[in-house]
Amino acid sequence: MALNRLKANICGTSYTLVSEESLSYMRDLVAQVDAEMAQIITDDRRMSTTMAAVLTAVQNADKATKESRAADELRLQLKRMVDECEHLKDQLADARAESARLQKELLQLRTAPSAPPAAPPAAPKPSFAPGVRDAFSDFEEILDEAEDF
């Protein structure tokens, strides 16, 4: 890329800037630095141009550091989200496979020949001691006779 040269005036001092950046970008930066330095000098008339330049540099370094940290945090959040999306994609694939398996099983059940429902198993007869067994048999006979009425 070609180098661009810009003659700039910052707080009354002339500078020649050389950069690969566009001239309009360079002009915007010069205007921003000039405005920040002018504001510092306006706020405290005892400030020299050098002191204002140092304060402006510190303020801009502070902004850049904080924005870099914020960008790092955003990158970390984005990575977590991408990882979560991958995990969810895996879960979705598993769920689709299970759904396909269940649909296949349902189709097999629907197309299988119908067998009559099996009769429930007969309840086992309770076992009693010999004397109780005779009384129970008598009780069953009484119930059978009562059903005949």
Image (cartoon, helix red, strand yellow):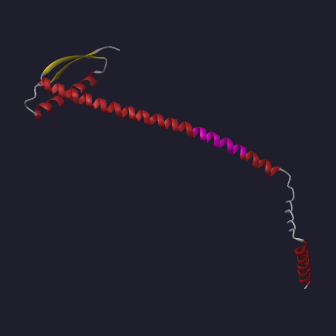
Q: Main secondary structure of the magenta part?
A: helix
Residue 10: % across, % down: 16, 23
* Residue drawn at 24 percent across, 24 percent down: 27
Quarter of image, res 32: top left
Residue 64: % across, % down: 29, 29
Q: From this viewpoint, which residue is outermost toward the left?
A: 46
Q: Is residue 17 left or right of residue 122?
A: left
* Residue drawn at 79 percent across, 52 percent down: 110
Q: Nearer the viewer, residue 36 or 75?
A: 75
- Residue 17 visible (yes or no): yes
- Residue 11 visible (yes or no): no
Where 114 falls versus 35 (above or below)? below
* Residue drawn at 31 percent across, 17 percent down: 20
Query: Can residue 11 be found in the magenta stretch?
Result: no
Q: From this viewpoint, which residue is outermost toward the top?
A: 2
Residue 80: % across, % down: 47, 36
Q: Nearer the viewer, residue 133 or 77?
A: 133
Image quadrant holding the N terminus, namely top left
Q: Is residue 17 left or right of residue 116?
A: left
Image quadrant holding the C terminus, namely bottom right
Q: Is residue 32 left or right of residue 129?
A: left
Q: Nearer the viewer, residue 38 or 138?
A: 138
- Which stretch is magenta? 89-101
Quarter of image, res 55: top left
